[in-house]
Image (cartoon, rainbow, N blue to C red):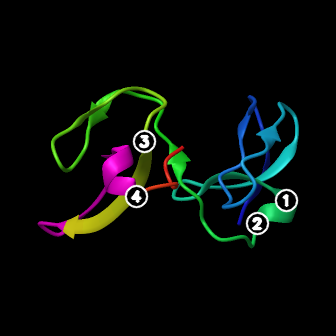
Amino acid sequence: MPTIVAKKAGTCTAAGCGGRILKGEHVEYFAATGTRHLECASAEQGRRPNLRAGRCRCGAQVAPREGSIQLEEKTRGGRFVRRWLVLCARCVGPGLSS
């Protein structure tokens, strides 16, 4: 995983951590997993927070900071497509929503 210096504060996306990441802190980053503390780099993937309003795959409207997001990567018509899917608390499952 690439190590970068965080340009803004955020939250660690590793399962079981969820700790605060400070501006200027060295972190691990991938688009699919988000930012993580260096010591959390090998931890299981937690859920990325949903920062924008959107519609879940079940049709429910999800407000900002509710539910979570998941990266979907696939090939469509010979082209590589990457998009973020919004998941509501019901689709994420009990106790797993952020």
- Residues tagged 1 and 4 counted as in contact (Cβ below 8 A): no
Q: Which quadrant of the rendered structure holds the C terminus? A: top right
Question: Does residue 83 appear in this view?
Answer: no
Question: Local crowd at mark 2 within 10 Å, few (<14), some, or many (≥20)?
Answer: some
Question: Which residue is label 2 attached to?
Answer: 41
Percent from the top left, x then y, of residue 63? 36, 26
Which is nearer the N-term, disc 3 or disc 2? Answer: 2
> Which quadrant of the view contains residue 6?
top right
Q: Residue shown at 17%/69% (left/top)?
A: 78
Q: Residue shown at 49%/48% (left/top)?
A: 97
Task: Quote the CA–CA distance across marks 1 and 3.
Answer: 25 Å
Which is nearer the N-term, disc 2 or disc 4? Answer: 2
Task: Quote the CA–CA distance across marks 2 and 1.
Answer: 5 Å
Task: Quote the CA–CA distance across marks 3 and 2.
Answer: 23 Å
Task: Indicate yes or no whether the magenta region holds residue 28.
Answer: no
- Left or right? Give the position of 32 relative to 76: right
Question: Which residue is label 3 attached to?
Answer: 67
Question: Which residue is label 1 attached to?
Answer: 38
Q: Amino acid at mark 2?
A: Ala
Span highlighted in magenta in the image: 76-92
Q: Amino acid at mark 3?
A: Gly
Which is nearer the N-term, disc 1 or disc 4? Answer: 1
- Residues tagged 2 and 1 counted as in contact (Cβ below 8 A): yes
Question: Does residue 5 appear in this view?
Answer: yes
Q: Amino acid at mark 1?
A: Leu
In this view, the residue in front, 34 or 65, is 65
Percent from the top left, x then y, of residue 38? 85, 59
Q: Which mark, residue 93?
A: 4
Q: Residue shown at 71%/66% (left/top)?
A: 1
